[in-house]
Image: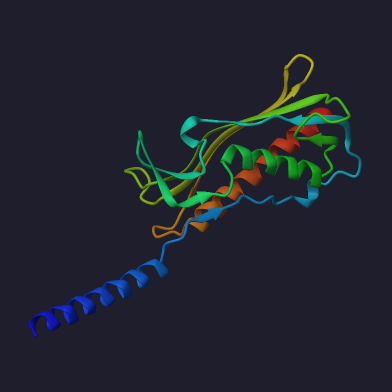
Amino acid sequence: MKNLKNKIVATCLLVFFVILLTNCTSKRILKKYYALDAQSDSTLIQKNALPFSVIIEPFWAHPAYKTRQIALRTRSHELEYYYYHQWAEAPDVALRFLLWRKLKTLNVFQNVDLAIGQAYPNYGISGSIDRIEVKNPDKKTHYPQARIKARLELFDLKNRQVVVWHEFDRSAKLPKKFGMNQFVERVNQMVNEELDVFIQKILKSLQ
């Protein structure tokens, strides 16, 4: 009789744990991926493209940010990385493609490519990302921030001489309890604004 009761108890416990395990696996936390999107200023659209061909070289990123994991600066020299929140593309790849898309949409150059095509390019564009991160509140700022620091250069492809350069270090305030999409929205806005400034400098220099 005792053996029968023990078997019943064991069976009930097994069923309970199976149900519990099923519920846990059905509520798995999924990874979320975030993308940067081009936002073009219609006032920059050119009726006549500049008569040059341009190649956008692969961008450089600081090794700490050359990853799809979104970085969180917890202290002055301390970084952590979100596990369930990631970039859809590594930031250096995303920024390069974003600039290419804007230059094409705004009709800035006669040809703009990511690789050398039929027309040998007159100019090249390079870029570097030094920081792109969520920054925790500190003694100076009592709220979290979105930060990006980067540099863009247009250079003569014959001698690598820089013709136009643009460097920026931007931060934007985030709500104390922010969602990751809010962080990406701030970064996206800052990046698009700075790319527009870079394009304006190019037009002023080459027109």
Front-most of 160 and 138? 160
Residue 55 horizontal side relative to residue 94, left or right = right
Residue 131 position within the rendered picture, expressed as x and y whole percent measured from the top left: 50, 36
* Above or below: residue 144 compared with residue 200: below
Quarter holding residue 200: top right
At 86% across and 43% down in the image, what residue appears? 46
Q: 15 or 185: nearer the eye?
A: 15
Residue 78, image x and y in percent? 35, 36
Give left or right: position of 114 versus 177. right
Left or right, 148 with respect to 84, comes to: right
Q: Image check: 24 left or right of 162?
A: left
Give the total number of marks visible in the rendering: 0
Q: Which of these two is toward me, 17 or 191? A: 17
Q: Residue at image x 65%, y 45%? A: 193
Q: Quadrant of the C terminus?
A: top right
Q: Which colour scheme is used?
A: rainbow
Return the residue found at the far top: 159
Image quarter (top left, top right, bottom left or bottom right) of the N terminus: bottom left
Q: Residue furthest bottom?
A: 1
Residue 105 placed where, x, y %?
Answer: 80, 47
Q: Which of 28 and 54 is in front in this view?
A: 28
- Location of residue 201 with respect to 1 vertically, above or below: above
In the image, residue 66 sits, relative to residue 153, either above or below, namely: below
